[in-house]
Image (cartoon, rainbow, N blue to C red):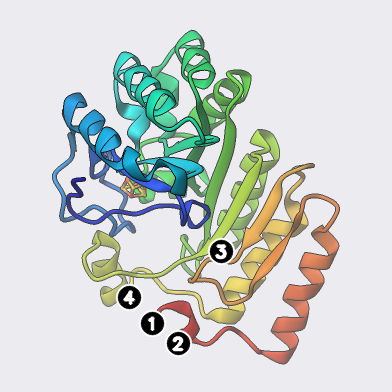
Amino acid sequence: MQYYGNVFRPPSEARSLIVQATVGCSHNSCTFCYMYKDDDFRIRPLEDIKKDLIEMSSYKDYFERIFLADGDALVLKTEDLLEILKTIKEYYPNVNRVSSYATAQDINRKSLEELKTLREAGLEMLYIGFETGDEDLLKEIKKGITYDEYVSAMKKAKEAGFKTSVTIIAGLGGVDGMEKNAVGTAKLISETKPDFLGYLTMRIYKNTPLYADYISGKFKMPDAGEILEEMKIFLENVDSEGTVFRSNHASNYVLLAGNLNEDRETLIKAIEKTLKKKNFRPDVLRGF
Ligand code: SF4
């Protein structure tokens, strides 16, 4: 089994077999992102991916899920992904979910028919980092995607039958962009209604372009209270019936879990209570 560089996976894939289909992220330009800055993007040879899967199949009974890493395994050619899914079916009969990160660009590049074929072959869940729904902020962070492209990617993914898990980031627009980030993101989530939504909190990493803006004072990092105010604005504006909502990432100042829209008021009250008591999760528990 071969792993190259930094390997990341969503929290819900903690018990999954992680197989690198690519190394790094095909976009790798987002100004806030530290994840794959040390890795030159490449697609691994299909034979190597299959070799890893076959080698690890002696432990097949340990795994119920497989996660195809790295940053966006959906960038692979459809025929190669189908070959990987076929190998998984053959060697891991007990696996009940295969998932991967995907960029909206990857989804939009594939036809609906291709996506449907992948879904039928066993790829079930796509994790997509929206980060924000604010058009200006999407440009600023060099996400390489527009609001409308997110909407069409989600429509296509859903029509093909995929489950979608989306992440957004409170504080991404800094102090000056708090309200715009919250309102724009609420609009995008309301329009796309993902199955799962993870609300993360902005953190600044030294190996990112955003760090220079932070040091120069151009980017003003919101404090804990401001982050929670932003999350509150988001929740007050979002309308995404049926979405499972979580803010239980290491980065968060408050841990929240519920279903939209039914738990929205409870979630807002939990934020208000934390703001009043100022009992934010301490940095030591937030991975600092
Ligand atoms: S945020 Fe996602 S798309 Fe952007 S560089 Fe990082 S891994 Fe790639």
Residue depicted at 57% across the width and 72% down the height: 227
Disc on the earlier residue, 1 or 3:
3
x and y percentages locating residue 165 in the rendered image: 56, 43
Relative to 154, is 65 on the left or the right?
left
Say few, some or many: other residues with alpha carbon within 10 Å of mark 1 (under 14 / 14 to 19 / 20 or more): few
Q: On the image, numbered disc 2 is attached to which residue?
A: 284
Gap in angstroms between the C-alphas marked 3 and 4:
16 Å
Tell us which disc is closer to us: 1 or 3: 1
Which amino acid is tagged 2? Val
**Which of the two residues, 39 or 215, is positioned nearer the viewer here?**
39
Q: On the image, numbered disc 1 is attached to which residue?
A: 288
Gap in angstroms between the C-alphas marked 2 and 4:
25 Å
Q: On the image, numbered disc 3 is attached to which residue?
A: 178
Disc on the earlier residue, 1 or 4:
4
SS at circle 1: loop
Q: On the image, numbered disc 4 is attached to which residue?
A: 217
